[in-house]
Image (cartoon, rainbow, N blue to C red):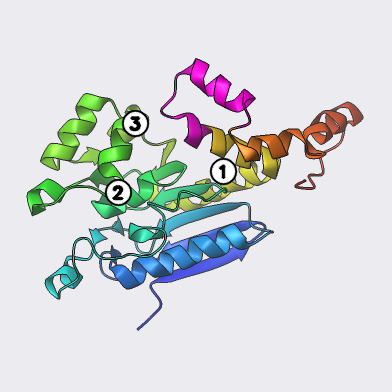
Amino acid sequence: MAHPVTTVRRDGIHEITLDCPKANAIDVATSRALYDAFAAFEADPQARVAILTGAGDRFFSAGWDLKAAEQGEAVDADHGPGGFAGLTEFHQRRKPVIAAVNGLAVGGGFELALACDIILASDHAQFFLPEPTLGIVADSGGVLRLPRVLPRALATRMLLTGERLSAAQALQHGLLSEVTTPDALLPAARALARTICAAAPLAVAATRAILAGTAHLSVEEGYRAMRAGAFPAYQAMLASRDSLEGARAFAEGRAPVWEGH
């Protein structure tokens, strides 16, 4: 059997592909394989950005593998240190992940996309959480993350009914940063990844840490947390040589050379 997850590394970008025909469904073994890919990305000192996509053009991921469930895999099975799909509970990661949603993002597949930092999608993609119709809850992040990125009334409706959101609707409501044709999806994700790679790595890490750590706070509380040293990545950025390199490079009319410290 082919490996369910493949990684291609080039120019600081890890391109991670979920490849589980026919629907890119995810069982425990695949969750652990995804975590291994994301952990390797985090541990690679040359890696700056990851792109996550699904093989084929119909499914990004159908979510939890119901065939595995039928064969005895429990709904609360141990999916490994990153939680379901290797990313939904990988809270300690520092580097950005871009989801390139190439088709249907269903249930846990949608939750996997929600765990990424930025979502791009093909124009035929659809997003939905059918868990209540299956007797379960979207507890791999859907019930927690979706109300933070969509209007609460719409998120609640989707969570209770399993109704679908088209790519165009998802873009309209701010879930997606970009919608492309199928052929343009990966080129767009790669272009975005290269743009992020051009930024200072410590600044990217600090921005991610502040975004994650202040999502539940007011603006005033967020300021207080930053000024009190609540985010080590932010403090590392402030103390780095890279924090001076950008202004110096601008004044000298050259491209910055980031050291990462």
Q: Nearer the viewer, residue 124 or 98?
A: 98
Specify the quadrant of the image occupied by residue 154. top left
Mark 3 Cα within 10 Å, few/some/many (few <14, many 20+)? some
Specify the quadrant of the image occupied by residue 218. top left
Q: Which residues are magenta?
A: 211-229
Q: In the rendering, at what x and y percent does residue 260 appear?
A: 75, 47
Identify the residue shown where x is 43% and y is 50%: 100
Tag 3 residue: 148
In the image, which is nearer the foreground, mark 3 or mark 2? 3
Which of pointers 3 and 1 lies earlier in the amino acid sequence?
3
| Marks 1 and 2 in Cβ contact (< 8 Å) | no
Identify the residue shown where x is 23% and y is 32%: 155
Tag 1 residue: 192
In the image, which is nearer the foreground, mark 1 or mark 2? 2
Mark-to-mark CA distance, 1 and 2: 21 Å
Q: In the rendering, at what x and y percent does residue 75 appear?
A: 19, 61
Magenta span has 215? yes
Mark-to-mark CA distance, 3 and 2: 14 Å
Relative to 64, 233 lies left or right: right
User: Dot 3: what SS?
Assistant: helix
Identify the residue shown where x is 30% and y is 69%: 28
Which of pointers 3 and 2 lies earlier in the amino acid sequence?
2
Q: Is residue 27 visible?
A: yes
| Marks 3 and 1 in Cβ contact (< 8 Å) | no
Q: Quadrant of the N terminus?
A: bottom left
Name the residue type under label 1: Leu
User: Dot 2: what SS?
Assistant: helix
Identify the residue shown where x is 82% and y is 28%: 247
Name the residue type under label 2: Phe
Q: Nearer the viewer, residue 192 or 64?
A: 64
Tag 2 residue: 110
Which of pointers 1 and 2 lies earlier in the amino acid sequence?
2
